[in-house]
Amino acid sequence: MVSDGKFEICAPSVVGEVIDGEAIVMDLRSGAYYSTDGLGGAIWQAIEAGATRLQILDWAGAALGDQAAVAAFLDDLLARDLVRVTSGNGSVPALPVLAGPYASPVLSVHEDMQDLIQLDPIHDVDEMGWPKRKVDV
């Protein structure tokens, strides 16, 4: 399989967790949070495992029967700066066997708490990180 680089989460600015198959992802820069379940949650786990775009397209595209929908989902994650592609390809991660049928993965965007999340003082820190507050110059 030809590799085009591994996906990785844009940490530490982006955090996520998969609970009962649903991925909940928060962008601490913007305050937006996202959710995806079904095949989308499984794809998020594959990204956490370091899978490449081609590995995910082959694996999830086969389960869905539609690589274009999987590619569009991955492009959406990239466009929202939730994930990035690194130059390394490493080994093939252990991806679970997917048993369909699956619906096309969808990333739901939730911006209702952006203001509250941005008010959190954890965003007002210097390069040392929390709890070191940024000094105004």
Image (spheres, helix red, strand yellow):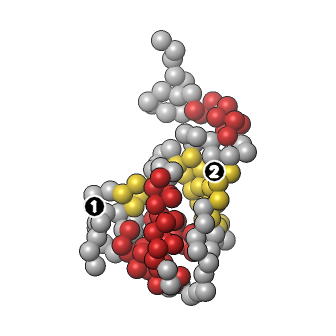
Q: Is residue 9 visible?
A: no
Pointer 2 local density, CA inside 10 Å: few below 14, some 14–19, many at least 20: many
Which label belongs to residue 33?
Answer: 2
Using the image as rendered, state which of residue 85 and residue 12 is in the foreground.
Answer: 85
Q: Say what secondary structure mark 1 lies in.
A: loop
Residue shown at the point (54%, 24%) measured from the top left: 133
Q: Position of residue 28 (x, y in %)?
A: 57, 42
In the drawing, does residue 84 fall left or right of residue 110?
left
Tell me the amino acid under the disc marked 1. Gly
Residue shown at the point (73%, 45%) measured from the top left: 112
Q: Say what secondary structure mark 2 lies in.
A: strand
Using the image as rendered, state which of residue 42 and residue 58 is in the foreground.
Answer: 58
Q: Position of residue 94 (x, y in %)?
A: 42, 77
Which residue occupies the extreme top position in the image?
137
Which label belongs to residue 88?
Answer: 1
Q: What whole-number distance in Å separates the C-alpha atoms at marks 2 and 1? A: 28 Å
Tell me the amino acid under the disc marked 2. Tyr
Mark found first going from the N terminus, 2 or 1: 2
Residue shown at the point (58%, 74%) measured from the top left: 104
Q: Quadrant of residue 36?
A: bottom right
Q: Is residue 10 visible?
A: yes
In the drawing, does residue 117 fall left or right of residue 41?
right
